[in-house]
Image (cartoon, grey):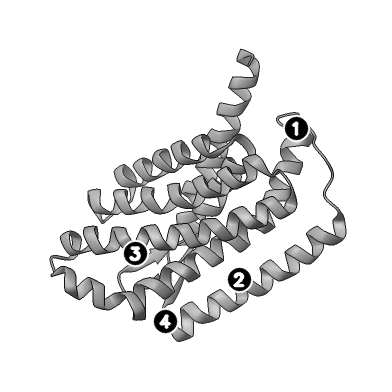
C-alpha cells in the first residue's frame, strides 16, 4: 500500500472522527443517568470504508478526546463509551468486510446492534456499580426496565442513522478522489432503505421520549 493511500486513509478517518466527536454537541438523548448521540454511526461508516480495525481505533480516539475535553464521568465514562462504540463499529466492519453489498451493510448494522446491546449489559453489570457506588444487584434489577431497552434503542437508532449517512458520505469521498469508485447501489433499494431507516428513527425517538421518559438535548440545551 502506497504512502499516498495511507495518508488519504488517515486524513479521511481523522475528519470522520472529528465529525463523530462533534455529534455530542449537536444533539443527544438522555434517559436517567444514561446518554447517547449518533457518533457510533459515524464510526460505523469508518469501519465500513476501511475495515473493523480502523473503526475500533477510531472509537478509542474519540472516547479519549471526549475524556480529556467534556466528559463528566471520568474514566468510567471513557471505558463505557469505548466499549459501546468499538462493539458497534467493529461488528459492522467485520460483516461488511466479507459481504460488501447493501445487504451486507444492513446485516452488519443489525448484528452490531445486538452485539453492542449484549456487551453493554455485561459492562453495565460490572462497571456501573463502581461508577454509581451501588450493589451489583441494584444494577441487575435495572436491566429489564432501563438498561436493556435503552441499549436496544440506542443500537437501533445508530443502525438507522448509519444506513442513511453511509451512501452520501462515501459518494462525497469518491467525488473528492479520496475513495475508489465501486459498484453502484440500485437507487430504488437505497430509497426504500432510507424510508425504513427514517421510520425506525421516529419510532426509536418515540420510545425514548415517551416509553422510557427520556429527554432530548439540542446544541447542548
Q: Mark 1 Cα within 10 Å, few/some/many (few <14, many 20+)?
A: few
Quarter location, residue 179? top right
- Estimate the spatial distance between the alpha carbons at disc 1 and disc 3, rounded to whole Å: 41 Å
Residue that lies at the very extreme toward the top in this rendered image:
3
**Residue 36 percent location from the top left of the image:** 43, 63
Q: Which residue is mark 1?
A: 176
Q: Which residue is mark 4?
A: 212
Task: Say whether marks 3 and 4 touch (CB < 8 Å).
Answer: no
Q: Which residue is mark 2?
A: 201
- Estimate the spatial distance between the alpha carbons at disc 3 and disc 2, rounded to whole Å: 22 Å
Q: Which residue is mark 3?
A: 121
- Estimate the spatial distance between the alpha carbons at disc 4 and disc 1, rounded to whole Å: 42 Å
Q: Earlier in the sequence, mark 2 or mark 4?
A: 2
Quadrant, the C terminus: bottom left
Quadrant, the N terminus: top right
**Residue 91 percent location from the top left of the image:** 52, 49
Q: Earlier in the sequence, mark 1 or mark 3?
A: 3
**Residue at point 38% right, 65% down?**
35
- Estimate the spatial distance between the alpha carbons at disc 3 and disc 4, rounded to whole Å: 17 Å
Q: Is residue 11 left or right of residue 138?
A: right
- Estimate the spatial distance between the alpha carbons at disc 2 and disc 4, rounded to whole Å: 15 Å
Q: Mark 3 Cα within 10 Å, few/some/many (few <14, many 20+)?
A: some
| Closer to the eye: label 4 or 1 | 4
Amino acid at each position: 500500500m502506497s504512502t499516498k493511500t495511507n495518508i488519504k486513509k488517515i486524513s479521511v478517518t481523522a475528519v470522520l472522527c472529528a465529525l463523530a466527536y462533534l455529534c455530542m454537541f449537536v444533539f443527544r438523548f438522555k434517559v436517567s443517568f444514561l446518554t447517547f448521540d449518533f457518533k457510533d454511526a459515524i464510526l460505523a461508516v469508518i469501519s465500513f470504508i476501511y475495515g473493523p480495525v480502523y473503526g475500533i481505533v477510531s472509537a478509542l480516539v474519540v472516547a479519549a478526546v471526549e475524556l480529556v475535553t467534556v466528559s463528566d464521568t471520568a474514566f468510567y465514562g471513557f471505558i463505557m463509551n469505548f466499549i459501546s462504540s468499538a462493539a458497534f463499529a467493529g461488528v459492522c466492519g467485520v460483516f461488511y468486510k466479507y459481504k460488501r453489498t447493501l445487504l451486507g451493510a444492513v446485516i452488519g448494522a443489525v448484528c452490531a446492534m445486538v452485539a453492542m446491546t449484549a456487551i453493554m449489559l455485561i459492562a453495565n453489570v460490572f462497571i456501573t456499580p463502581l461508577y454509581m457506588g451501588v450493589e451489583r444487584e441494584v444494577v441487575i434489577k435495572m436491566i429489564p426496565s432501563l438498561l436493556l431497552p435503552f441499549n436496544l434503542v440506542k443500537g437501533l437508532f445508530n443502525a438507522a442513522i448509519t444506513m442513511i449517512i453511509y451512501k452520501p458520505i462515501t459518494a462525497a469521498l469518491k467525488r473528492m478522489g479520496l475513495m475508489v469508485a465501486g459498484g453502484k447501489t440500485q437507487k430504488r433499494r437505497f430509497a426504500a432503505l432510507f424510508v425504513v431507516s427514517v421510520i425506525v428513527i421516529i419510532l426509536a425517538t418515540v420510545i425514548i421520549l415517551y416509553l422510557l421518559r427520556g429527554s432530548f438535548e439540542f446544541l447542548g440545551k
